[in-house]
Image (cartoon, grey):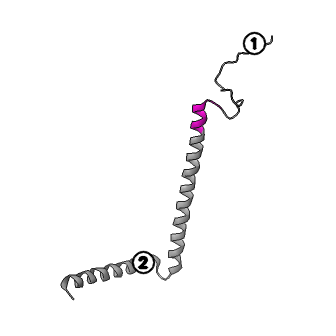
């Protein structure tokens, strides 16, 4: 075994020991809590991604209707900002 292999093995074992000590300090005997925390993080990330996608869809819809010039209650094919050509009946 060369000196470099021994050094790498020693550094790796120290890293593993530190990770185990950190996990024992954070979670103690509650080993199941670690998996619940990881799942909750994934659920939270999924909710955030879904919210961003929904906001993007709403923003895109708003901008596309704004550029086209049609509001949600406009007559199809007639822009809502066009002046009326029909004479008024008084």
Q: Is residue 68 magenta?
A: yes
Magenta region = 62-70
In the image, taking residue 42 as reference, residue 74 lies left or right, namely right
Q: Position of residue 72 (x, y in %)?
A: 68, 35
Q: Main secondary structure of the magenta part?
A: helix
Q: Position of residue 39 (x, y in %)?
A: 54, 70
The residue to which callout 2 is attached is: 23
Residue lying at 60% horizontally and 44% vertically, measured from the top left: 58
The circle on residue 41 is none
Q: Position of residue 13 (x, y in %)?
A: 31, 83
Q: Quadrant of the C terminus?
A: top right
Mark 1 packing: few (<14 Cα in 10 Å), some, or many (20+)?
Answer: few
Q: Is residue 39 magenta?
A: no
Q: Residue furthest top?
A: 90
Q: Residue furthest right?
A: 90
Mark 2 packing: few (<14 Cα in 10 Å), some, or many (20+)?
Answer: some
Residue lying at 65% horizontally and 21% vertically, measured from the top left: 82
- Mark 2 lies on a secondary structure that is helix
Q: Position of residue 28 (x, y in %)?
A: 46, 80
In the image, taking residue 13 as reference, residue 28 lies left or right, namely right
The residue to which callout 1 is attached is: 87
Residue lying at 60% horizontally and 40% vertically, measured from the top left: 61
In the image, taking residue 65 as reference, residue 34 lies left or right, namely left
Q: Nearer the viewer, residue 34 or 85?
A: 85
Q: Are marks 2 and 1 in contact (CB under 8 Å)?
A: no
Residue 63 visible to an observer of this rendering: yes
- Mark 1 lies on a secondary structure that is loop
Residue lying at 61% horizontally and 29% vertically, measured from the top left: 69
Residue 30 visible to an observer of this rendering: no
- Of mark 2 and mark 1, the one earlier in the sequence is 2
């Amino acid at each position: 075994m060369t000196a470099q292999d021994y050094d790498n093995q020693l550094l790796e074992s120290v890293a593993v020991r530190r990770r185990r000590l950190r996990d024992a300090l954070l979670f103690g005997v509650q080993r199941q809590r670690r998996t619940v925390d990881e799942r909750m993080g994934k659920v939270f990330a999924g909710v955030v991604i879904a919210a961003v996608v929904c906001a993007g869809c709403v923003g895109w819809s708003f901008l596309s209707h704004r550029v086209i010039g049609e509001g949600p209650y406009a007559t199809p094919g007639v822009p809502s900002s066009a002046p009326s050509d029909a004479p008024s009946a008084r």
